[in-house]
Image: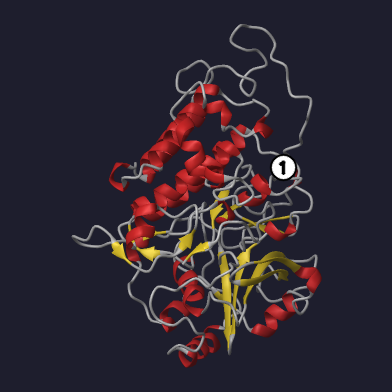
Amino acid sequence: MGNCLDSSAKVDSSSHSPHANSASSSSRASSKTSRSTVPSSLSINSYSSVESLPTPRTEGEILSSPNLKAFTFNELKNATRNFRPDSLLGEGGFGYVFKGWIDRTTLTASKPGSGIVVAVKKLKTEGFQGHKEWLTEVNYLGQLSHPNLVKLVGYCVEGENRLLVYEFMPKGSLENHLFRRGAQPLTWAIRMKVAIGAAKGLTFLHDAKSQVIYRDFKAANILLDAVINPRNLISPTPYSGFHFISNQLLYRSYSQEFNSKLSDFGLAKAGPTGDKTHVSTQVMGTHGYAAPEYVATGRLTAKSDVYSFGVVLLELLSGRRAVDKSKVGMEQSLVDWATPYLGDKRKLFRIMDTRLGGQYPQKGAYTAASLALQCLNPDAKLRPKMSEVLAKLEQLESTKPGTGIGNRPSQIDSPRGSSGSVVQKSPRRYSYDRPLLNITPGASPLPTHNNSPRVK
């Protein structure tokens, strides 16, 4: 549910020990719900509105969600082949993530290569991120449903064991695609598509009657669907809103490339209610992404997420991390380094990712950069709402060459430049319709290590 840091992150208030006040109720809830082998509803066709989220809820109520499967620890041991090292997908602050297989009908453990592929996150008993964040994730993802939120299939709570079972995300995290050495570069079009999907997820959370503030928006927490060719579809077998393609559990997105989803809701908070303008809480998040006013005061608003979105949009434009200790001076902070160039059309190219090979619409890049600059406004009140950010990005994506916003013909839009002469293509060719090789640590909701420590 986050990155493994040099120092421990603090949880909002009470102790996050697995035994804090609720171990007995947890066990009772687990034993009660585990009698049912299949949850009554895993449907993700309709979007569950957070308007109906009862708050607060007891731990027993959270773990009794009809949308989730309560797995036994033995079931998940069998599903992951006893958590064998060759099933390990990655490691983070929450613990370890393993690849597992479950039966598509009963959701019980199945043999490797048959049934549904899932990602199983196992809490480190000595980890600093504990029971409270685990329960928060079950609480929100057990009720919320949206194409741009990762699907939580179920959980396990037995003794000190805390596990979460997710849909498997074959394309891994945005962080891996942007920063992992040897990864094939994402095209401009895919980067904007990923940004739009993430913006949709945040907009869904922010615009609900019972607002949810994500609080840890970053590239590591944005997961990507695989590219699925409809020709490879086995006769569609719907099960509670899922299609089964090549023995993998996939969201209804086989016609979509790089559909992005938000994962890791361990730090999510309910937004302010009534006349309140903010939520006062302990500062949690990730350095480089957390809004400066939140870090300084602990006052959390939806505009804190908007700032974080601006940082990720800047990462998509530049191909550089929010915080990079290998750089010198101001360049260690992406925001500090890039901000002076964002509002200057003639200097913007200096921060653009060189791996794009110049193949992006110049005006479109400037529009996206200007939007990032608005999101990063030091005055939170002057930042746009996520719904406004989403509308601008969708407008940018939908506008065709020569029709206005950000679409001067360029290498990505047309083989000819504005003068009509043929633009020299980059000699490097990349295949974007195949999964990346050697990125298994990112093929799960658990982010890998990065250089951006959690705020403490």
Disc 1 designates what residue?
Answer: 229
The answer to whether any part of residue 211 appears in the image is no
Task: Name the residue located 72 percent from the left edge and 76 percent from the top edge.
Answer: 109
150 in relation to 403, above or below: below
Compared across the picture, whether 87 is left or right of 266 comes to right
Residue 360 point in image, percent of width and height: 60, 26
Task: Name the residue located 35 percent from the left edge and 67 percent from the top edge.
Answer: 53
Q: Work out whether residue 168 or residue 246 is closer to the camera in this orientation and state it.
A: 168
Residue 57: quarter of image: bottom left
Q: Work out whether residue 269 or residue 157 is closer to the camera in this orientation and state it.
A: 269
Task: Name the residue located 74 percent from the left edge and 54 percent from the top edge.
Answer: 439
Q: Residue furthest bottom?
A: 24
Residue 33 point in image, percent of width and height: 53, 83
Colour option used: secondary structure
Mark 1, Cα crowd under 10 Å, few <14 / some 14-19 / many 20+, is few
Task: Name the residue located 45 percent from the left edge and 62 percent from the top edge.
Answer: 144
Q: Quadrant of the N terminus?
A: bottom right
Residue 77 point in image, percent of width and height: 72, 80
Residue 204 point in image, percent of width and height: 41, 52
The answer to whether any part of residue 175 appears in the image is yes
281 in relation to 359, above or below: below
Mark 1: secondary structure? loop
Residue 404: quarter of image: top left
Residue type indicated by callout 1: Asn
Compared across the picture, whether 169 is left or right of 369 comes to right
Q: Work out whether residue 256 or residue 11 is closer to the camera in this orientation and state it.
A: 11
Q: Residue furthest left?
A: 275
Compared across the picture, whether 395 is left or right of 354 comes to left
| Count of numbered tags | 1
